[in-house]
Image: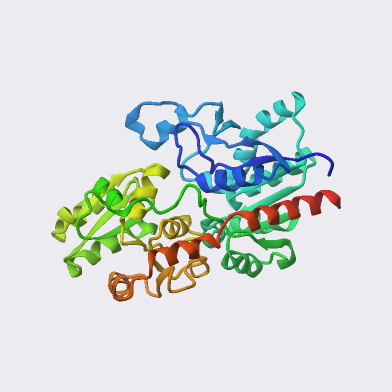
Amino acid sequence: MDRPIRTLLFSTLYPSSVRPSHGIFVETRLRHLLASGQVETRVVAPVPWFPSTHPYFGSYAQFAATPQREIWNHIEVFHPRYFLPPKVGMNIAPVLLAMGAYRTILSLLRQGVAFDLIDAHYFYPDGVAAMILGRVLGKPVVITARGTDISLVPRYALPRWMIQRAGRRCAAIITVCKALKDELVDIGINPDKVTVLRNGVDLKQFYPEDRQWARSVFGMSHFALASVGNLVPLKGHDLVIGVLPHLTDAELFIAGSGPEERRLRALANSLDVADRVHFLGMLTQDQLRLLYSGADALVLASSREGWANVLLESMACGTPVIATDVWGTPEVVAAPEAGVLVEERSTDALRFGIQRLRSALPDRLATRRYAEAFDWEATTKGQLDIFNSLLNR
């Protein structure tokens, strides 16, 4: 094309000034795509409607506090509201999401903001809603599947049917790992329509800091394990805490926030390891870089992961990982210098995995070199190829 490709990025997974870490992996991929100079975009990132910004309501109040429009990291982002009723919301979310965003998108079009395609992230409800909008507006839709949208949601009959329908009607599908492509094919999606484009790691953001300084920032004095992710059951922070009674010279640093914090603290107390478990809350990317650089290993005990960005972030800082062998994780941890995979998601398996890694810790420079192979160049080229191909049809 003799001009940049104009995209409308559509996803509920996108950062804002209120939730700066929310969906940061979507923003990161977009930033690398924009850096090519071959794409320009508008971002429509709807948030559920909520009536109050009072802190009592926690994360719900953040929805209400999110601005309708903002410039975030030099990108214009719109946050229209959509109604999401409790309990029944899952089955009707795509329609409500499309209705909530339609007025904002129509307003952009009336202002002369044209776009060639909709670039949707997260298959359900976002990708299905994008297909509704694409049909109404006459625009092709590319949907990226990222994890639980395919590994979990299709277990429910109506969402599964909507995913199948959207998968057959959209112009193209991207998955962040081969395991997600295989799952889509298993539910009836044409494999020729699905392209695997794994996430990269921002090597300019994540790199080894001075290790002694990084350890001093967090007060690390023993063999330091890091566990990074929202404090929810699927992340398995409780399993990592359960390892500590068997590793008396180890301490654990947990980065993240969420509803499980009280239970995790109680677990640490009941196991008599509370003095070795440090809850850090949500960290910025700069703080995460320091945490990775100071830690001896990152432990990720997830039950489901499409493509776990924290693994590559840790490796880019020179820190190897211990991770459960789920979904796309074997595609990330595929060499000794990367770390160790554990086949069983249990405290015992994690303990043996940590001991195995400790017995033959890889050179931190080798771990960094491994991560350097996962830059964003191939992913950016893959997206451009898909966009150009469908626009030239």
Spot the residue most to the right.
Answer: 393
Percent from the top left, x then y, of residue 41? 68, 37
Residue name at image x 35 percent, y 54 percent: 293
Relative vertical location of residue 350 with respect to residue 166 in this rendering, above or below: below
Q: Considering depth in this image, is 18 or 130 the residue closer to the camera? A: 18
Q: On the image, which quarter does residue 103 sit in? A: top right
Spot the residue most to the top.
Answer: 111
Q: Is residue 21 left or right of residue 82?
A: left
Residue name at image x 28 percent, y 71 percent: 351
Q: Residue 350: in sight, yes or no? A: yes
Percent from the top left, x then y, of residue 275? 15, 53
Q: Residue 306: in sight, yes or no? A: no
Percent from the top left, x then y, of residue 260? 30, 50
Q: Considering depth in this image, is 226 or 172 the residue closer to the camera? A: 226
Q: On the image, which quarter does residue 79 sit in? A: top right
Spot the residue most to the left.
Answer: 272
Residue name at image x 43 percent, y 60 percent: 315
